[in-house]
Amino acid sequence: MTESLGTGAVDGGANSSVSDVATNARSGWEGAVDPFAQSASGGNVSRETIDAFANLDDDLGSPLANEMIATQRLKHELEATDFPRPPRTRIIAVSNQKGGVGKTTTAVNLAAALAKRGANVLVIDSDPQGNASTALGVDHRSGTPSIYDVLLDDVSMAKVAQRSPEVSNLWCVPATIDLAGADIELVSVVRREFRLYDALEALLAGPGKDLDYVFIDCPPSLGLLTLNAMVVAREVLIPIQCEYYALEGLTQLIKTVEMVKKHLNKGIEVSTIVLTMYDGRTNLAREVAEEVRSHFPAQTLNQTIPRSVRVSEAPSFGQTVITHDPHSSGAVAYTAAAREIATRGADSNEGADQ
């Protein structure tokens, strides 16, 4: 790395026009900045929001209009809120063996949201697909020093970590295609379940001592790469898509965490469940959310993550949605989720200290 990990800066009627809709909608905002005062490229509202208003068909009672107003209100509330910093480094494994649930997307956007609010954050890309590395804009071409070298060749994590070009206090340990065979290669390695633990402990004792959060993006499987993440993590964050298929593997994942807790890491807990790809207009999404909350009331975040084109397209720009379009519904939702995680962690530590 060119810079040490510890040195980052913490830095209406039926014939009403769209403008009439916007005017009436704004009248319900209490002290909010006028979102239509500037263009999407340099103003307070995203292109996504303007496009959505343009497609309202002059329906003043549209749920979409209400959703956009709520998003803007939440955005301004978040801007006026401080995110508490944890008293010690929080190590969070982001895991779900089912693919396509928003695991990597959740990991990188929560990390970026926390970093944008002043926290020092490291993302460890432990998924051979390397999607977290792509979203954070770091090099992960074949041959790039990566988590593979850390796990198999004892290379220092500080030497392979790269600073994200979009957020100065956000780093990433990238994954390259070499990681695809690591599950097999680790089988014969000494302390195979503790390779990541040893490397991360060394980092936190040295150049990474000022890190507030470490997010480990696990592969969509329960092999040795995921096991290494759970051995070092103190928390497990599980993203769950709001569809019934996404619930099928949850029981097995919980059992795996309990096995790790019993035999390898007594301090690990499932601390957070995030409901992703949520569409409140459908009964299915609401039913799945209610079911998850009924079984895991303490772990499930109040904030859900909606489907958003901006969230999906951000990685193609080498960015998270937090930097790609900070005014979009997805960015606001992930920032709200990050605040909830930060607040829960602070409250948990305060309770432990009493």
Image: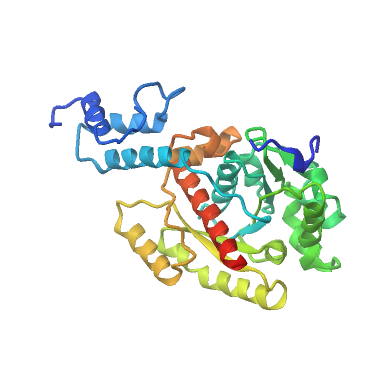
Residue 200, image x, y percentages = 77, 56
Relative to 62, 39 lies left or right: right
Residue 67, image x, y percentages = 32, 42
Residue at x-position 67% and y-position 70%: 267
* Residue 140 in view of the camera: no
The quadrant in which residue 2 appears is: top right
Residue 9, image x, y percentages = 69, 35
Quadrant in which the C terminus appears: bottom right
Quadrant in which the N terminus appears: top right
Residue at x-position 58% and y-position 36%: 319
Residue at x-position 79% and y-position 58%: 201
Q: Could you say which is closer to the camera, residue 353 or residue 42? A: 353
Farthest bottom residue in view: 262
Colouring used for the render? rainbow
Is 86 placed above or below 290 here? above
Q: Could you say which is closer to the camera, residue 212 or residue 225? A: 212
Residue 23, image x, y percentages = 24, 27
* Residue 90 in view of the camera: yes
How many marks do you count on the picture? 0
The quadrant in which residue 286 appears is: bottom left
